[in-house]
Image (spheres, helix red, strand yellow):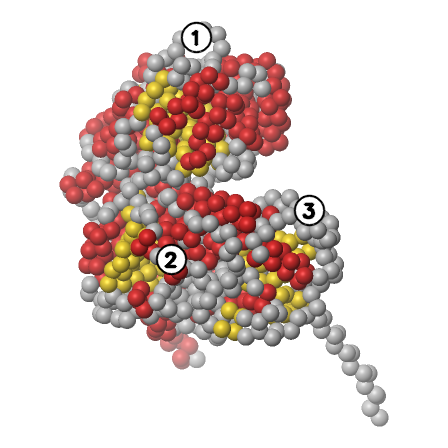
């Protein structure tokens, strides 16, 4: 089940459990959504996490982290029942003898699949002359349409002197342009019963809308206008920064420095949601230039999931973008720089207890699926003979469509690296194939259920690889492709018996976090001798 | 010094310019007249704001259970929803009993389906408890089997005790002012016993084992229940599981078996809330007009004072229900208005936060606002927009809820008059809402929702008011302080 957005759970009273029998006390069914929609009318009935609110004073949306389970890998760990934490940090500070190799060597994206042979519904995947990639899928179960405009830029593209720039600019795109008044896009969606939200990640910004199909033309028109010459003024920029300031940082399980090291992208290290004085000092001309540089249709993908037949819808979309000048598609490759050595790279982190290993995950749904399955399996592995009773290995996945990381935390042993190696080797050798198969099947079911609804399907299609390395997917034209290949379900639907990790969980590709040595206290200056 | 004096001379002009520049930023006010009917294209697009359901399979099992099987070939999940009417059963009149039974259903089915990928939920609707299970398609038969085990249990005394403990751990020590005010108003409007519409800790603790078991037997009788299934298989594929369900889940004793789902789920409203009572004025008077309805004062903690007022509105036909919902949508733009349609009648409630300084003014303004809205003819396109928003939000919410057709079906039950009409009820409702008749709505509003000049039947009460606030409220209305300490003179 798709978790219901927090904004839609709006109990009237603050008590945890309202027991008044008549549902008058709570907003039930569509009324909850109506309330949310009313936010756009300025009635002040509440403010939601995922929903654009009135633009007068409140921020229109909190920037959402990319959709995904909070922790898709949590589960009962029957064997790992260690209670105490190991005080010994374990790792001996391994040296990095690995080499960095850029590319998608670890990606499991549909490249290895024969798409023509895959069963199931197909979508239309194409690139318009203006460089915009468009994915059109059909979901006829309810008269709603989901539209996602995913732009392949993110907080890691901030200039060093202007941390938080992309985040603030994403908010500024809600301020309208010549065709849309500030907050006009949100109001148009809300007035028809839809919801709309903004997601800002390290390498992707998404504008997401779910609306009744009667509003589809309006929503498509909004997305065809959103990036065209946004209105820029000092006043609007001031309110943009107010919204951006209220949008707190996302808590990642891995420290940002570890993410940056694992992906080989130093720009991931800074907090992309800060509002610095450098942003406050920006003048309209610079803001306009920054918007024009970073938010362009040739960097974007428009995903539409609706009950309409894709070929018909395709024509309507093509007409909306026909007046834009022809541009080649321009997408940066976000594949991690896979390290190929045998020893993990040690990274000193202040306050780190040790025993944590961080791997990058390739930016496509299939790789995320694979990492999720491995992680679930690792969390459920039985303790190996000879392991201490307190030995415990926990796996966590920081989900992000472009910069996901997998974190293994070994505790209760003197040598965490040996524990990680023993457990992963066991998976690699196929000794836990039954366990892995069970997790794969469970994830396949969960994803099938989740991707049944229009908005989660559109969000998942936005995870699909931007196709930087694939000239075929960057050239103008349309292709019919199976939905399952782009969502990762195809890879989850075949047995994994005997399948290794590839580059995913090899020790050399990891970053191991070690405690930073404490800096010696500054020596007190020697007392001066009294001047004579 | 000369320069200083010159600057001082410019001050008034600067201020004037500043004021003018501020003024210029405001958008000019333009009176809009948009009373034309909506365009055909829009109406056609919106007419599809209802689920595209094929005809469901309806069956009555040997045990008397009515089942609707909604078949969607591509559905990856099976949704099962059991509707258990509370109705006017004496054993289920206490909200505390229902709360314990509902919790037991969630715990019992949840524990049995754990590790099967089945999500179990329960909902308390005004007149029924709904038990919902979302299961992977391959678990459909097994979930039906488990459902039979839970609902067919004869006297689950231990489970009910566990549920009681669970309720006690989660229940608030005392209700909030809002809960207290609205539940009391609802009790008065429906003519129910005081306290029957909210769960209280002391009452849950005091419930006897027999009362719980009696409530259990009344609630889980298949001869009063309805099962709705939304699955990728049709009902024939699950005939053995349904047969088993009929064998294991049976009712006790002899009792009349209403043949239709609507007859089971739509209990007759209590006499105090019947259409007759609503029109005769027996349920209450008018607000700030004659015959005046006294303002009931709720005892309790002082704090932010809340005023609630409302009435029962007869909604015997689908058209009446559409009008009621449209009216609520329009009024909600200016007031905190809630509407709960309960078959042939609807409960309409307005909540107002009273100003601490001038509570009588807040109360008068709210009543005046409602009176004024009821007297205003709304432009056709405004009504169309309100309907569009409501219907759009409904399908969007259904999509966010995981496209569970059984939830929409449950809603459609309240909109139909016969079982055969349920499948088309949402579409019909959408159609009638999208063809609003502004004059009919105004007439309806003036009759039912004008608290000063419309039909009597209004009640109001205040909760959380201080003595000073009560004294000020006496300036506009007589107080009914039965059960509360009178304010000092």
Residue on which the image places disc 3: A81
Please state the horizontal and vertical placement of residue B337, each as a whole percent of the image.
37, 33
Q: Which chain carries label 1?
A: B
Dot placed on the residue nearer the N-terminal end, 2 or 3? 3
Q: In this view, does A401 lie above or below B316?
A: below
In the image, residue B425 lies at what x, y percent? 27, 28
**Residue B472 visible in the current orientation:** no
What residue did someone put label 2 on?
A113
The chain holding disc 2 is: A
Q: Distance between the residues labelled 2 and 3?
A: 40 Å
- Residue B448's x, y, as percent? 30, 24
Q: Quadrant of residue A328?
A: bottom left
Q: Distance between the residues labelled 1 and 3?
A: 54 Å
Query: Which residue lies under the disc numbered 1?
Result: B255
The residue shown at (54%, 75%) is: A99
Residue B96 in which image quadrant: top right
Q: Which quadrant of the figure contains the N terminus of chain B?
A: bottom left
- From the viewer's perspective, tell me whether residue A413 is left or right of residue B52: right
Q: Are marks 1 and 3 in contact (CB under 8 Å)?
A: no
Give the structural element (helix, strand or loop) at label 3: loop
Q: How many residues crowd mark 1 within 10 Å: few (<14), some (14–19), many (20+)?
A: few
């Amino acid at each position: 089940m798709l978790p219901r957005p927090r904004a839609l759970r709006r109990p009237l009273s603050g008590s945890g459990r309202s027991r008044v029998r008549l549902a008058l006390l709570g907003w039930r069914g569509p009324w909850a959504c109506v309330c949310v929609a009313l936010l756009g009318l300025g009635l002040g009935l509440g403010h939601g996490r995922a929903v654009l609110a009135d633009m007068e004073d409140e921020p229109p949306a909190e920037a959402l982290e990319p959709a995904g389970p909070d922790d898709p890998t949590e589960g009962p760990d029957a064997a790992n029942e260690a209670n105490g934490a190991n005080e010994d940090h374990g790792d001996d500070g391994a040296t990095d003898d690995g080499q960095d190799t850029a590319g998608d060597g670890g990606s499991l994206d549909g490249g290895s699949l024969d798409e023509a042979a895959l069963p199931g519904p197909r979508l239309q995947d194409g690139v318009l002359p203006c460089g915009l990639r468009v994915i059109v899928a059909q979901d006829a179960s309810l008269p709603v349409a989901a539209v996602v405009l995913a732009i392949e830029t993110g907080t890691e593209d901030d200039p060093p002197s202007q941390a938080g720039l992309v985040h603030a600019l994403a908010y500024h795109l809600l301020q309208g342009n010549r065709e849309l008044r500030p907050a006009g896009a949100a109001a148009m969606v809300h007035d028809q019963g839809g919801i709309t939200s903004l997601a800002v990640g390290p390498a992707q910004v998404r504008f997401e809308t779910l609306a009744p199909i009667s509003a589809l033309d309006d929503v498509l028109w909004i997305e065809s206008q959103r990036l065209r010459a946004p209105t820029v003024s000092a006043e609007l920029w001031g309110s943009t920064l107010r919204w951006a300031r209220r949008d707190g940082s996302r808590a990642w399980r891995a420290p940002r420095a570890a993410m940056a090291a694992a992906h080989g992208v130093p720009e991931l290290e800074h907090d992309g949601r800060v509002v610095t004085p450098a942003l406050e000092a920006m003048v309209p001309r610079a803001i306009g230039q920054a918007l024009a540089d970073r938010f362009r249709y040739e960097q974007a993908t428009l995903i539409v999931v609706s009950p309409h037949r894709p070929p018909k819808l395709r024509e309507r979309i093509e007409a909306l973008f026909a007046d834009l000048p022809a541009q080649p598609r321009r997408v940066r490759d976000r594949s991690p720089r896979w390290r190929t050595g045998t020893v993990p790279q040690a990274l000193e982190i202040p306050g780190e207890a040790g025993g944590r290993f961080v791997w990058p995950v390739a930016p496509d749904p299939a790789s995320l699926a694979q990492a999720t399955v491995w992680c679930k399996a690792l969390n459920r592995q039985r303790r190996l003979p000879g392991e201490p009773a307190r030995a415990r290995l926990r796996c966590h996945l920081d989900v992000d469509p472009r910069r996901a990381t997998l974190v293994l935390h070994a505790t209760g042993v003197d040598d965490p690296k040996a524990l990680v190696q023993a457990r992963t080797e066991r998976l690699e050798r196929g000794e836990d194939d039954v366990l892995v198969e069970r997790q794969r099947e469970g994830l396949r079911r969960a994803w099938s259920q989740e991707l049944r609804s229009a908005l989660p399907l559109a969000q998942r299609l936005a995870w699909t690889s931007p196709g930087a390395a694939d000239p075929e997917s960057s050239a103008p034209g349309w292709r019919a492709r199976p939905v399952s290949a782009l969502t990762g379900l195809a890879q989850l639907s075949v047995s994994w018996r005997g399948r290794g990790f590839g580059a995913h969980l090899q020790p050399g590709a990891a970053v191991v976090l070690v405690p930073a040595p404490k800096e010696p206290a500054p020596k007190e200056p020697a007392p001066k001798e009294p001047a004579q | 010094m000369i320069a200083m004096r010159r600057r001082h001379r410019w001050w008034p002009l600067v201020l004037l310019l500043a004021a003018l520049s501020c003024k210029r930023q405001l958008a000019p006010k333009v009176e809009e007249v948009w009373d034309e009917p909506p365009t055909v294209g829009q109406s056609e697009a919106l007419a599809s704001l209802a689920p595209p359901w094929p005809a469901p399979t309806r069956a009555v099992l040997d045990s008397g259970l009515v089942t609707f099987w909604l078949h969607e070939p591509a559905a990856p999940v099976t949704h099962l929803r059991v509707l258990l009417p509370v109705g006017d059963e004496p054993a289920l009149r206490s909200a505390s009993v229902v709360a314990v039974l509902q919790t037991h259903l969630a715990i019992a089915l949840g524990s049995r389906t754990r590790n099967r990928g089945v999500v179990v939920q329960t909902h308390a609707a005004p007149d029924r408890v709904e038990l919902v299970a979302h299961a992977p398609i391959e678990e459909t038969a097994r979930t039906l089997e488990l459902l039979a085990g839970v609902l067919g249990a004869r006297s689950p005394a231990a489970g009910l005790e566990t549920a009681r403990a669970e309720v006690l751990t989660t229940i608030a020590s005392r209700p909030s002012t809002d809960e207290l005010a609205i539940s009391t108003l609802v009790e008065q409007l429906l003519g129910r016993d005081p306290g029957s519409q909210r769960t209280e800790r002391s009452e849950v603790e005091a419930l006897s084992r027999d009362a719980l078991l009696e409530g259990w037997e009344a609630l889980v009788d298949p001869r009063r229940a309805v099962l709705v299934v939304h699955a990728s298989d049709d009902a024939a594929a699950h005939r053995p599981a349904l047969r088993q369900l009929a064998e294991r889940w049976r009712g006790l004793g002899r009792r009349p078996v209403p043949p239709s789902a609507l007859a089971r789920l739509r209990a007759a409203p209590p006499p105090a809330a019947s259409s007759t009572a609503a029109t005769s004025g027996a349920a209450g008077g008018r607000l700030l007009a004659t015959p005046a309805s006294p303002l009931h004062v709720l005892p309790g903690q002082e704090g932010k004072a809340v005023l609630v007022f409302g009435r029962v509105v007869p909604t015997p036909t689908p058209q009446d229900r559409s009008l009621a919902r449209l009216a609520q949508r329009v009024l909600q733009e200016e007031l905190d208005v809630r509407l709960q349609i309960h078959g042939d009648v609807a409960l309409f409630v307005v909540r107002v936060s009273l100003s601490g300084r001038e509570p009588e003014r807040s109360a008068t303004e709210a009543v005046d606002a409602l009176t004024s809205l009821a007297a205003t003819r709304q432009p056709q396109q405004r009504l169309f927009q309100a309907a569009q928003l409501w219907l759009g939000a409904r399908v969007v919410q259904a999509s966010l809820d995981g496209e569970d057709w059984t939830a929409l079906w449950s809603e459609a039950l309240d909109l139909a008059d016969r079982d055969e009409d349920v499948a088309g009820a949402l579409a019909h409702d959408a159609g009638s809402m999208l063809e609003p008749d502004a004059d009919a709505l105004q007439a309806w509003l003036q009759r039912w929702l004008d608290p000063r000049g419309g039909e009597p039947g209004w009640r109001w009460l205040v909760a959380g008011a201080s003595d000073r606030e009560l004294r000020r409220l006496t300036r506009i209305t007589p107080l009914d302080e039965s059960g509360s300490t009178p304010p000092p003179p």
